[in-house]
Image: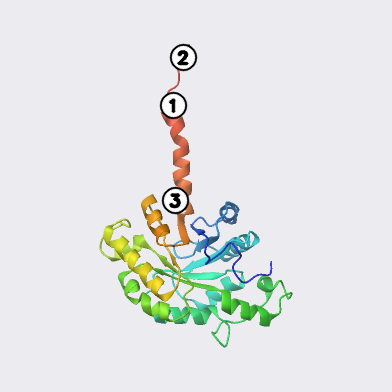
Amino acid sequence: MIATSPSSNAIPGKSPRLGLLNSLPSPLIVDMIAQCGYSFVIIDTEHVLLDENTLRECIQTCRHHTCTPLIRVAEIRPNFIGKVLDAGAMGIVLSRAETAAQIHTLAQAMKFPPLGTRGITGGTVTGYGQLPLSNYIAQANENTLLVPMIESQSGLNALPQMLSTGHVSFVMEGALDLALNMGLGPSPLHPDVFEALNNMHQMCLQADVPFCPNPRTPSQLRHWQELGCTLFLCGEDRSHFSKTLRSNLQPFRTHQPAPLGA
């Protein structure tokens, strides 16, 4: 597959683009997510122990289904970022983003000269020589997505400066970590957190950069839809799987067997 830009189903766009955080490190799980119709998958390397071969297979599985693979990182390691982009990742999500300097540094690691410092190679992203390197460089520099995830008050305060760099493709929220950082405990639904998320949205709106919320209740979903959001993170695969597995047990546990001999 020779493609460096997000697919027509991917991000951003005017119609809803729905993504899922992948915390179960398996190409089979990513295959299932993509085939269910999600536009993008965020493969987590912040909290998940993921070997590079498995990560490569997950990325390639996404691309096979024209589902945009994004990699969430906790730190800016240019060599690692270059390798995941070489493997076909279409963007980087930076967790706990807090400064414009981080955004500049990440953009440098993601882009080829003269816009950045990323090193060049061939391989899968060029169809093993079918796409000229000059074409690939131009496409990758223009289309690779840089996404800060705001998870602290410091990040929220610095968001206008991050947006002013011109490097941000869209912004994600991390309401749970934000709540912890604000001293509210593990309370992503706290009114103060929701106010902070609305402030994020307003900053993004002013900068004409899409905001991607992670609605946790039906009312939150309606709220963001009414505000015109078209990018949504639909939670995490691990949570969805565990809830479904538990709910599947209930009919068996609540069924009362008939008496013997009845």
Residue carrying label 2: 260
Q: Percent position (x, y) of residue 48?
A: 47, 61
| Distance between the alpha carbons at the discs numbered 3 and 2 | 39 Å
* In the depicted structure, whether residue 106 falls above or below residue 180: below
Mark 2 nearby-residue class (10 Å; few <14, some 14–19, many ≥20): few
Residue carrying label 1: 255
Residue carrying label 3: 239
Viewer-closest of 50 and 66: 66
Q: Quadrant of the N terminus?
A: bottom right
Q: Percent position (x, y) of residue 148?
A: 43, 71
Please name the residue shown 53% across and 57% down the image.
Answer: 25
Please name the residue shown 44% across and 74% down the image.
Answer: 208
Q: Which mark identifies residue 75?
A: none
Disc with the residue nearer the chain's start (2 vs 1): 1
Which kind of residue does numbered mark 3 sit on?
Ser
Which kind of residue does numbered mark 1 sit on?
His
Which kind of residue does numbered mark 2 sit on?
Leu
